[in-house]
Image (cartoon, helix red, strand yellow):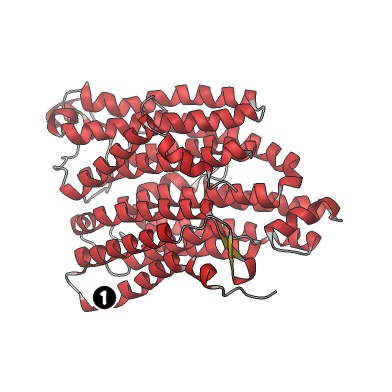
Amino acid sequence: MGVSFAAGNILSLLPVGVIVLAALLLVLLEVLWAGRANRRLAGFGGLAVVVAGIAQLVYFPLLPSPVLGGALRFDGFAAIVALTVLAVLFLTLIVSPAHMARMGLRGGEYYALLFLSASGMMLLPAARGLVSIIICIELLSLPLYVLAGYNRRLAFSREAGFKYFLLGAFASAFMIYAAFIWGTTGTLSLGVIAESLPSAGNRALLLLGLGLLLVGFAFKAALAPFHAWVPDVYEGSPTPVTGFMAAAVKVAVFAVFLRVLMEGLMPLAEFWRLALYVLAIITMCLGNLLALHQMSLKRLLAYSAITHAGYLVLGLIAANAEAVSAVLFYLIAYSAAVIGSLALVAAWATRRTDDVYISDLRGMAERQPLAALALTFFMLSLIGFPITAGFVGKVLLFYAAYKAGYIALLIIAIINTMVSVYYYLRVVQAMYFLPREQPEDAAEGGLKAAAPVSVVAWPYLTVALISAVAIVVLGLVPRSLLVWLSMCSF
């Protein structure tokens, strides 16, 4: 198979090329700027992200643009995902220097690892072969294993890095067994796999390969019962890294998951729909139940991420034209809410825990009214409250499931949404309706005194306000984004 080097096709790689080049330069600049690296590296990285974003908009592929013999094929869907990843990366860079300084961490390879992981995320939705998909997932994952354990002073962080690496390696091993699909179809290309499946010979081997591939994706997408790594990794990772993982990884993984199912495995839909149906129910219910009693805000958001993964599976099961736009919109809305929430967690976290507990938020509306209002919008969007982007995302996703005829699954999702109101509004209640707990009161009740909550510095507040504005704007005028997304369906 020949390799395409047409000028238009090569230009499709320009945004990713800018990010990879920036990662290499960041390694060099860290040596040159030793001792004063954090803010300068973040500033250089932010400039590179802006350049990559402009390049992505200028060379927005209206038609599929194959590269490297079709192993990668850039289209509007992949471009939307890449722009979302770049936006999350940019917001992460804003909060990282201040948080690194507070935690006593040097920049070092931190920024280069963020950029390398982002390059894998940008390439992943453009991958059109099983091997290229696995390679992109590894490019996405390997830097994150290091970043999860980056705060080596904390035992939680070291544990997070180890668990993420160990379970991520298991997931990758499962995905490699997608070779069984190649063994029965004789191809690695998604489009050719779809054409070959009806005439594939060894049905048992084919279904085995399908099952192992689904297990690998379930690990990466944090679907129960393959979710065990999520709470510990979210809690132990440096908070900006947690935000980056929670938003950007979910966007990239669900985007390629949807593409694999719709472009490569539709002839086997009766099998993978049944498997995902069961996984969706387990994921939504288990994530909600485990979130009910969480006091750590990072762990609450971790179980919330599991629950939202269950909601997103509805779009995968529907696998219709509406589902593509619905999944993309939901991912963008979720990313804005979670990156904003974790920016505020980073602002209020203490050096000893790098976390915030709900008791720490008591009376926050009086002390930090703007930050409290932003966090309220994030919680309401995660619930799916009207006037927020989360509401529009859930309506679109649930409508796609309804149109596909999955009424029972839709009812279960609605019930779980109602259950989630309890733990999201606990955060709002603590900020607005509970007085600030005094240390002597906590001691008398046998409780741990609330950690001192610092003033919200401008980098954290900037990210929170940008995210909050995005949530409100997309909630009030979603058509501005939906029209664009509808043109990028595959």
Residue 38 percent location from the top left of the image: 22, 65
- In the figure, 458 relative to 43: above or below? above
Left or right: 374 as drawn, with respect to 410? left
Under circle 1, the secondary element is helix
Please say if 179 is above or below 403.
below
Q: Residue drawn 53% across and 58% down?
A: 124
| Image point (60%, 40%), residue name | 316
Q: In the rendered image, is residue 305 in sight?
A: no
- Circle 1 packing at 10 Å, graded few (<14), some (14-19), many (20+), is some
Pick the front one: 36 or 443: 36
What residue is at 63 percent from the left and 49 percent from the top? Answer: 215
Q: Nearer the viewer, residue 184 or 63?
A: 63
For the N terminus, the image quarter is bottom right
Name above or below for residue 338 compared with residue 359. Answer: below
- In the picture of the structure, the residue carrying the numbered disc 1 is 29
Give residue 212's position: percent from left, percent from top: 68, 52
- Left or right: residue 53 compared with residue 355: right
- Measured along the vertical axis of the image, is residue 166 above or below residue 4? above
Q: Could one spot residue 335 in this view of the protein?
A: yes
**Residue 202: x and y, percent?**
85, 55
Q: Amino acid at mark 1?
A: Leu
Q: Is residue 249 left or right of residue 340?
A: right
Give the image location of residue 351, x and y in percent.
21, 51
Q: Quadrant of residue 33?
A: bottom left
